């Protein structure tokens, strides 16, 4: 992650990774996840995901991408 403030930080969710589930923050810059860690620096925007499960990079098949 660069020293610049990320565009978006999702805080406090239960993040599902290949290693298991962990309470973590996710930093996003542009269209890319740049960090998943227990604490990341503040972002330009922040979402409180406390009590929610986060599946980074998962696309919901019900989004109807082809329409």
Image (cartoon, grey):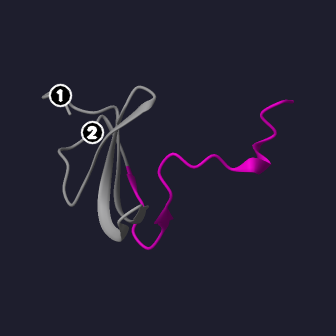
Magenta extent: 47-67
- Residue nearer the viewer, 43 or 61: 61
The residue lying furthest to the front in this view is: 18
Identify which residue is drawn at 83% across, 30% down. Answer: 66
Choose top left, top right, bottom left or bottom right for residue 64. top right
Horizontal placement of 10 versus 41: left or right?
right
* Image x and y of residue 62, in percent: 78, 49
Is 34 drawn above or below residue 23 in the view shown?
above
- Taking the spot 35% from the left edge, 65% from the top edge, the residue there is 19
Task: Determine the residue positioned at 17% across, 28% down.
Answer: 2
Classify the position of the C terminus by image quarter.
Answer: top right
Question: What kind of element bears circle 1?
Answer: loop
Q: Residue 50 in the image: state x and y as whole percent.
A: 39, 68
How busy is the neighbourhood of tag 1: few (under 14 within 10 Å), some, or many (20 plus)? few
- Placement of 49 over or under 27, stated as above or below: below
Q: Which residue is mark 2?
A: 43
Q: CA distance from mark 2 to mark 1?
A: 12 Å
Q: Which one is earlier in the sequence, the residue at label 2 or at label 1?
A: 1
Residue matched to label 1: 2
Q: Main secondary structure of the magenta part?
A: loop
Residue at figure coordinates x 41%, y 32% from the top left: 32
- Give the secondary structure at mark 2: loop
Residue lying furthest right in this view? 67
User: Magenta stretch: residue 59 in it?
Assistant: yes
**Vertical placement of residue 62 versus 1, above or below:** below
């Amino acid at each position: 992650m660069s020293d610049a403030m990320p565009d978006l930080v999702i805080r406090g969710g239960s993040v599902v990774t290949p290693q298991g589930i962990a309470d973590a923050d996710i930093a996003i810059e542009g269209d890319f996840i740049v960090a998943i860690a227990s604490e990341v620096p503040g972002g330009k925007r922040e979402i409180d995901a406390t009590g929610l499960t986060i599946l980074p990079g998962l696309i919901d098949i019900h989004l109807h991408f082809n329409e």
